[in-house]
Image (spheres, grey):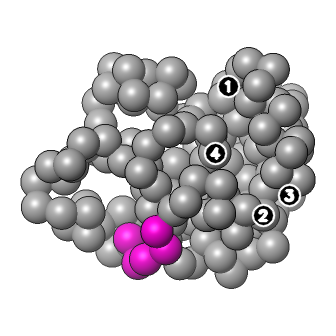
Amino acid sequence: MTPSFESLVERLGGRIIETRGEVKTVRQAAKELGVREEQIIKTLVVITGEGPVLAILDGRSKLDLSKLGEGARLASPSEVVAHTGYKVGEVPPVGIPLKTYVDERVLRWERVYGGGGSVRRLVELDPRVIVEHQKAEVRRLRA
């Protein structure tokens, strides 16, 4: 994680949380933080006909790829790194210069928790700030 990412999170009113161990699943993240799984967000990289995009959903929802266009598919692990600079499970919801879509359910919470650039870090942010910063389109993405 670069100092510029840390600065960005701070500027956006968020915080970076160092975890006690590796956090690779929604369930692990929720348990580590003592929050509901719905407050954990997944930042997924999807390859569409128009190129790679980010899809952000709450931790309990499944992505309906058809909502991002015909032929949309999840990026492979190597594509995730190529397009974001982060590994699967580490991708933060802000600071990635890709078109971003946020499922409307994410906005139910005042604070959400997502990838912090490492399996040992999470980021806490206001979901409305994620939408604003990423210039994201809010729509139903879940199945």
| Distance from the alpha carbon under mark 4 to that under mark 2 | 11 Å
Q: Is residue 26 visible?
A: no
| Distance from the alpha carbon under mark 2 to that under mark 3 | 17 Å
| Distance from the alpha carbon under mark 3 to that under mark 4 | 23 Å
Q: Residue at x 39, y 72 (%)?
A: 142
Q: 115 or 95: nearer the eye?
A: 95
Counting every numbered tag in the picture gives 4
Neighbour tally class for label 2: few under 14, some 14-19, many 20 plus, Cα within 10 Å: some
Q: Secondary structure at mark 4?
A: loop
| Distance from the alpha carbon under mark 2 to that under mark 1 | 20 Å
In x, y percent, where is residue 93? Answer: 61, 47
The residue beneath circle 1 is 118
Q: Disc 4 or 2, which lies upstream in sequence?
A: 4
Neighbour tally class for label 1: few under 14, some 14-19, many 20 plus, Cα within 10 Å: many
* Residue 47 inside the magenta-drawn segment: no
In x, y percent, where is residue 143? Answer: 33, 74
Q: Disc 2 or 3, which lies upstream in sequence?
A: 3
> What is the magenta range?
137-141
Q: Disc 1 or 3, which lies upstream in sequence?
A: 3
The kind of residue tagged 3 is Gly
Q: Position of 103 compared to 20: left or right?
A: left
Q: Secondary structure at mark 1?
A: strand
Mark drawn on residue 126: 2
The residue beneath circle 4 is 94
Neighbour tally class for label 4: few under 14, some 14-19, many 20 plus, Cα within 10 Å: many
The kind of residue tagged 1 is Ser
